[in-house]
Image (cartoon, rainbow, N blue to C red):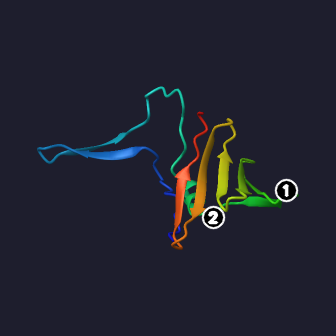
Amino acid sequence: MKDFLDRIPTQVGRRKITHADGTSEYVTVEMADNPTVIGTPLNREAFMALQGFEAFHVAFNDDGSITETNALNEPLDTVFNSDGTIDETFTNKNGLKIGLKTKFNPDGSISGDPIDFTA
């Protein structure tokens, strides 16, 4: 595991440009691409969440399933199927879903396949 740290600059966006002739200058660079979607920031919170270290709440449901809710109130639902497989479905705040079906194989190995929500 890796403990990620956020970079804390004293001069945000400042860059040094060194020209081919060896002279250099300092400039401030800012995004000017007019995005339609800002995107997920790459910061400590995001990287720690990838490793499973984030604030969450766990609910053990009456039907035997488990619902974990992260700090953004986005659920990860875990269902134990009668065929021995496990379905995990994450739904983000915009309603988009990603999922994984985990299967325990007769040889003792474990495999996983994405769940297709487009069908």
Q: Amino acid at mark 2?
A: Phe
| Residue at horizontal 61 percent and vertical 48 percent from the top | 99
In the picture as drawn, the residue positioned furthest to the left comes out as 21
Does 76 sit left or right of 98 as displayed? right
Does 114 sit left or right of 60 as displayed? left
Q: For residue 108, which numbered disc appears in the image?
A: none
Find disc 1 in the rendering and name its residue. Answer: 63
Find disc 2 in the rendering and name its residue. Answer: 53
Give the structural element (helix, strand or loop) at label 1.
Answer: loop
Toward the viewer: 52 or 42?
A: 52
Please say if 38 is above or below 87.
above
Toward the viewer: 25 or 116?
A: 116
Q: Amino acid at mark 1?
A: Asp
Who comes first in sequence, dot 1 or dot 2?
2
In the picture as drawn, the residue positioned furthest to the right comes out as 62
In the picture as drawn, the residue positioned furthest to the bottom comes out as 108
Does 99 sit left or right of 22 as displayed? right
Which percent across, then down, holds residue 93? 69, 40
